[in-house]
Amino acid sequence: MHLHKGAIPIDAIHTAMEPVDRVTLYRTLKSLSSKGIIHKAYQEQNETHYAICGNTCDSDHHHHQHIHFKCTTCKNVSCEKPANTLGISIPDYDVHHVSVQVEGICKECKYASSSIM
């Protein structure tokens, strides 16, 4: 199986687990997520990526202090620590979860394209 540095697309997980059917795969992913082992790192249209949680997540809550970055060149999705702390509050609301998805060019693709020039 190909090792991924960041989040793994659900199609790659399914391919690696074949001959597992999709229903079993989705139930397994839901169970791992509910136990704080993995989390949805990126979701857009029919594309979902999952990443392994750190040791701060548990079956009660996911505690992620990072953003999800998708490279528009290589299509990899990674969990990245922001330079500034993200803090969002809404008056008269209790915010439990904030998800941030950012797209751009990752450092590997950026340096690869600059070394060609």
Image (cartoon, helix red, strand yellow):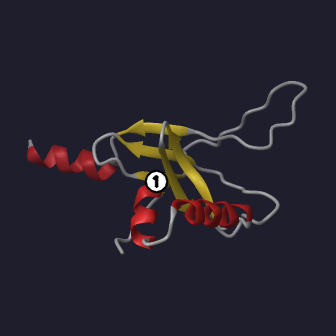
Report the front residue among 83 and 73: 73
With 44 as the anchor, is 86 left or right in this view?
right
Q: For residue 91, what is the image quadrant?
A: top right
The reply to whether residue 61 is in sight is: yes
Report the front residue among 52 and 90: 52
Q: Residues within 10 Å of mark 1 (few under 14, many from 20)?
A: many
Report the front residue among 9 and 78: 9
Q: Amino acid at mark 1?
A: Ser
Can you say which quadrant of the picture contains the C terminus? Answer: top left
In the image, residue 67 above or below residue 7: above
The residue indicated by pointer 1 is: 78
Q: Position of residue 104 (x, y in %)?
A: 37, 37
Can you say which quadrant of the picture contains the N terminus? Answer: bottom left
Tally of numbered tags: 1
Give the residue displayed 32% in from the left and 49% down from the top. 107
Give the residue displayed 47% in from the left and 56% down from the top. 10
Q: Position of residue 25 (x, y in %)?
A: 56, 64
Q: Residue furthest right?
A: 92
With 6 as the anchor, is 32 left or right in this view?
right
Q: Position of residue 99 (x, y in %)?
A: 63, 41
Q: Position of residue 95 (x, y in %)?
A: 81, 37
Q: Residue furthest left?
A: 117
Give the residue displayed 59% in from the left and 66% down from the top. 24
Q: Residue furthest bottom?
A: 1
Give the residue displayed 49% in from the left and 38% down from the top. 44
With 50 as the anchor, is 71 left or right in this view?
left
The reply to whether residue 9 is in sight is: no
Under tag 1, what secondary structure?
A: strand
In the image, residue 40 above or below residue 25: above
